[in-house]
Amino acid sequence: MIKLKLRLEDLKSGLNEFWASYTDEDLDLKNQDFELVNKLDLYIRAVKRGRNVELTLEATYTLRLTCARCLDKFNKKFNEKETYYIKIGKEPFFEEKSLKERDIFTQFIETDEIDMVPFVREIVILSVPMKPLCKPDCKGLCPVCGVNWNYETCEHMNQPKVDTRMAKLLELKSKLGM
């Protein structure tokens, strides 16, 4: 177990490995559209080369999400892995610079401590699907009476789906006899 910060002077040159666990409070994940179930387990692989560190984080956790179709709460397990390149000091300024893939994941920090929380929070937040589904074939809610079609049926279930935005055009079409 480690604390929420890695001190550069405590890392030996070469490979360093750590394990940590974080809670909702540690990661400040309140006021999100999801919640962390129990804790997040983290494997940290830090390779120190001088004052630079290659940081690989493997996070295993479960999130409680809300289905975008039926609004039911469900748990989903995640196993995410990211690599960051930490450089101590300020980023040098160049008028023009072409980016490489590694540059996107390079972080410049001004202290000799690497705070793990922002990296872990980023991993968790970016892993949440834009449209979480409780199951791939979720039937959703009835747009008329609100019944959850995964558990029960209603008289609206087999009615043809008419887009309300097209209703006037369909009415015009029937008047014209088309």
Image: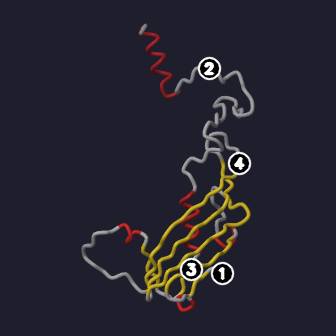
Give how far across and how far down residue 118 sits, in percent.
55, 73
Q: Amino acid at mark 2?
A: Gln
Q: Earlier in the sequence, mark 3 or mark 2?
A: 3
Q: Earlier in the sequence, mark 1 or mark 4?
A: 1
Tell me the mark number nearer the camera, choosing from 1 and 3.
1
Asked if disc 3 and disc 2 are in contact, CB closer than 8 Å, the reply is no
What is the C-alpha distance between the residues marked 3 and 4? 32 Å
- Looking at the rendered image, the quarter that the N terminus falls into is bottom right
What is the C-alpha distance between the residues marked 1 and 4? 32 Å
Tell me the mark number nearer the camera, choosing from 2 and 4.
4
Badge 2 crowding class, 10 Å Cα cut-off, few under 14, some 14 to 19, many 20 or more, is few
Asked if disc 1 and disc 3 are in contact, CB closer than 8 Å, the reply is no
Badge 1 crowding class, 10 Å Cα cut-off, few under 14, some 14 to 19, many 20 or more, is few
Residue 141's place in the image compared with 9, above or below, is above
Q: Which residue is mark 1?
A: 2
Q: Amino acid at mark 3?
A: Asp
Q: Which residue is mark 2?
A: 159
Give how far across and how far down residue 124 sits, in percent.
59, 63
Q: Which residue is mark 4?
A: 73
Residue 93: quarter of image = bottom left
Q: Secondary structure at mark 2?
A: loop
Q: Amino acid at mark 1?
A: Ile
Badge 3 crowding class, 10 Å Cα cut-off, few under 14, some 14 to 19, many 20 or more, is some
Q: Earlier in the sequence, mark 2 or mark 1?
A: 1
What is the C-alpha distance between the residues marked 2 and 4? 28 Å
Image mark for residue 22: none
